[in-house]
Amino acid sequence: MDLLILDDFGFRRLETKEAELFYTLVDERLGNGSTIVTSNRPPQDWINIFPDMVMGGAILDRLVSGAHKIIVTKGKSYRKERSSVRNRSLDTVVKKGYDEKRK
């Protein structure tokens, strides 16, 4: 796989088995493909999601090896924007169905 996208990285703390599998994944990808990581946490907080600091350090070392860092701290949330459009559409459908039932 040429590109792996990790969305919402660091959303929750990893269990030991998850961290071990993640290490294997990152280690095998090192130098073999691109990885994009998105997170609501700043990179300096990522170490805290791992149950073992040594394993966490090894994983992060492999993730940042040759990495380009882009940090966006301001801007619109794509999900919030899509969610509000989806909710307005859902409200329209629900209201339309309710109005048709009242006829």
Image: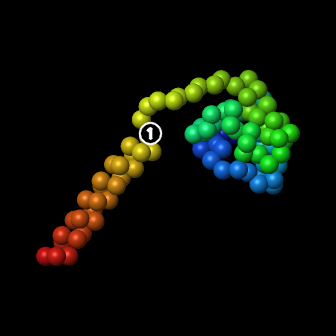
Q: Secondary structure at mark 1?
A: loop
Q: Position of residue 31 (x, y in %)?
A: 78, 29
Residue lying at the far bottom of the rendered structure: 102
Q: Position of residue 20 (x, y in %)?
A: 82, 49
Residue at position x 60%, y 44% from top?
8
User: Looking at the picture, which amino acid does disc 1 mark?
Assistant: Ser
Quarter residue 60 falls in = top right
User: Along the line of sight, which residue is nearer the eye, 28 or 46?
Assistant: 46
User: Along the line of sight, which residue is nearer the eye, 72 or 28?
Assistant: 72
Left or right position of 35 against 61:
left
Q: Position of residue 2 (x, y in %)?
A: 68, 35
Residue lying at the far right of the rendered structure: 54
Quarter residue 67 falls in = top right
Left or right position of 5 against 27:
left
Residue at position x 81%, y 53% from top?
16
Residue at position x 22%, y 65% from top?
96
Mark 1 surroundings: few (<14), some (14-19) or many (≥20) residues within 10 A: few
Q: Quadrant of the C terminus?
A: bottom left
Q: Quadrant of the N terminus?
A: top right
Residue 18 in sight here: yes
Against 61, residue 90 (above or below) is: below
Against 74, residue 25 (above or below) is: below
User: Along the line of sight, which residue is nearer the eye, 44 or 65?
Assistant: 44
Residue 28 in sight here: no
Mark 1 sits on what residue?
Answer: 77
Q: How many marks?
A: 1
Against 21, residue 91 (above or below) is: below
Left or right position of 41 against 22:
left
Residue at position x 25%, y 59% from top?
92
